[in-house]
Image (cartoon, rainbow, N blue to C red):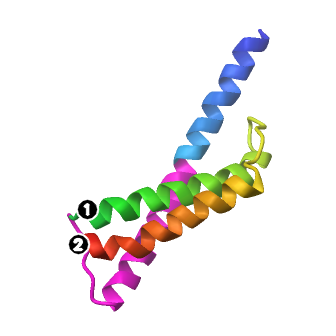
């Protein structure tokens, strides 16, 4: 019976992660699109758009692992500060280089 409840908790946490990913990903995607448009870049249907999407996915995953997972159904370990900073730096670099691939 213990395995059943751990499976249910994992499933609920996965659904929660998907909802958070969709909400925060949409918000960050819209904000980044507005910022790029202010600077005269259109990343729609380009490799740069895919790079921004990957950067958003990395950012939301780090934010989720470090902030939201503590309060969820499945208690996991947060990312170490070094790994968090590295992932966020890579994500920031992806946001910066994306217009060069438009």
Question: Is 95 part of what is drawn in magenta?
Answer: no
Q: Which mark is residue 47?
A: 1
Single out the residue that lies furthest toward the left: 45
Q: Is residue 11 left or right of residue 33?
A: right
Name the residue at 79% across, 13% down.
2
User: Would you name the residue on which mark 2 appears?
Assistant: 102
Residue lying at 39% horizontally and 65% vertically, measured from the top left: 52
Using the image, determine if residue 37 lies above or below residue 52: below
Q: Quadrant of the N terminus?
A: top right
* Region in magenta: 19-45
> Gap between marks 1 and 2, in whole Å?
6 Å
Q: Nearer the viewer, residue 14 or 81?
A: 81
Question: Which image quadrant is residue 53 in?
Answer: bottom left
Q: Is residue 91 visible?
A: yes
Magenta: predominant secondary structure element?
helix
Residue 98 position, x and y percent, is 35, 70
Q: Residues within 10 Å of mark 1 (few under 14, many from 20)?
A: some
- In this rendering, the answer to whether 82 lies above or below 8 is below
Dots 1, 2 in contact, CB < 8 A: yes
């Amino acid at each position: 019976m213990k395995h059943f409840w751990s499976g249910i908790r994992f499933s609920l946490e996965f659904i929660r992660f998907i909802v958070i990913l969709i909400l925060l990903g949409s918000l960050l995607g819209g904000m980044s699109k507005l910022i790029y448009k202010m600077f005269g870049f259109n990343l729609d249907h380009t490799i740069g758009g895919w790079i921004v999407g990957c950067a958003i996915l990395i950012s939301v995953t780090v934010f989720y692992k470090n902030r939201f997972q503590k309060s969820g159904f499945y208690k996991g370990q947060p990312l170490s500060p070094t790994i968090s900073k590295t992932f966020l730096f890579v994500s920031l670099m992806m946001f910066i280089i994306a217009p060069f691939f438009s």
